[in-house]
Image (tube, rainbow, N blue to C red):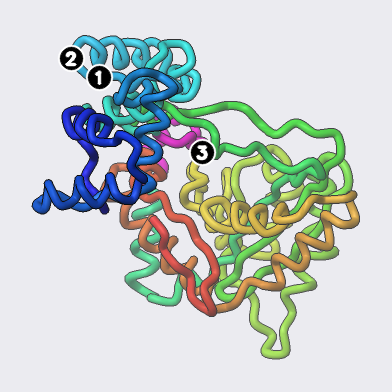
Amino acid sequence: MSKRLTREERIEIVLISGKRSNRVIAADFNAKHPTRPPISHATVSKLLAKFRETGSVLDLPKCGRKKTFTNEETSVAVLASFSQSPQRSTRRMSLESGINQTSLRRILATHKWHPYKLQLLQHLNEDDPDRCTEFAEWAKQKLEQDPQFTQKILFSDEVTFYVNGEVNKQNHRYWPDTNPHWMDPSKTVGTTKVMVWCGIWGTTIVGPFFINGNLKATGYVKLLHDDVFPSLCTEACMFPEFFQQDGAPPHYGCQVRAFLDEQFPGKWIGRRGPVEWPPRSPDLTPLDFYLWSHLKAIVYGVKIRDVQHLKLRILDACAGISPAVLLSVCEEWEKRVALTIQRNRQHIEHICVIKYFISGEKLVNNS
């Protein structure tokens, strides 16, 4: 690539131009300056045209926003602005301040500020850490007695899918110098929706089962009695050793607890169950830390037309999960139990952010 002509070299070309051709001028110039990269006749042509048009051999100033010099004063102003409004985007800040976006990002990176992503976390009450640690210690003891214990639990939960999709958190960012563990209470709002019950039992997905209307204790007992537990019958007549549910109001009805006492005497996990489930612990349920996010990523990969289309997408997504992946989910639950004890039950999602996707038959940790 030829070296850029200096101002003096450009003037020299104009002075020697006369009536000679551009090729001759380029040859004479190159002969006079053998140590610099040679110029072409096209370069001479452009330079002379510029001189005739502007009366100058200098380049015209470039269009667009001038490059901002990221000095200390500018840096302080940018950081102060983001401190006051940490959810402001760099694009909006650039438009308001006149500082180009590249300079803004350079300033933020230099001072180790990071665009933290929105995370949805449960608020913890005062006694929640103790209750969760107690559960984790119980689970750890069971795992020490039986390394296959996790695969003997039927984990269960319900969630709502909306025809119009879910909240897109990709554009939510929070700019500080330390992770604020930003919480957001917003929920997807929609008029057309489907409530889904699912379970994970070892290497098997139980369900999905679709629930009409709002779930109440009577409907929940009917779902377990008529649909869920009959579906567990296998040729080997195996049955889960433990049944887990969270503390949602429909799970707490007297008839629900009486039914579970009959089906799993002394061996069901839940609110006021033989084994107390710690409240506000979605990071300890495989359905919350894996299944629901995985299903929604698959289901909403296409535009949902109606409720029937939504149900079919959910059924197909569940059927596509392999036993190998579910085995890895069980292993992840065991790691989270250990981490809960280590962290004394403070939220572990921000230090155990795991995104799963299917790669052949393997569950890949993409943290």
Quadrant of the snapshot with the C terminus: bottom left
Q: Earlier in the sequence, mark 2 or mark 3?
A: 2
> What's the amino acid at mark 1?
Phe
Q: CA distance from mark 2 to mark 3?
A: 45 Å
> What's the amino acid at mark 3?
Arg
**Which residue is tagged 1?**
69
Q: Nearer the viewer, mark 2 or mark 3?
A: 2
- Residue lying at 22% horizontally and 52% vertically, measured from the top left: 38
**Which residue is tagged 3?**
280
Q: Secondary structure at mark 2?
A: helix
Q: Nearer the viewer, residue 266 or 198?
A: 198
> What's the amino acid at mark 2?
Glu
Please rate how many residues cluster around mark 3, counting C-alpha atoms within 10 Å: few if below 14, some from 14 to 19, many from 20: some
Indicate the position of residue 297 as horizontal and vertical percent values. Answer: 64, 54
In screen coordinates, is 108 left or right of 136?
Answer: left
Indicate the position of residue 254 as horizontal and vertical percent values. Answer: 73, 43
Q: Nearer the viewer, residue 29 or 2?
A: 29
Q: CA distance from mark 2 to mark 1?
A: 9 Å
Q: Nearer the viewer, residue 86 or 364?
A: 86
Which segment did they paint magenta? 116-133
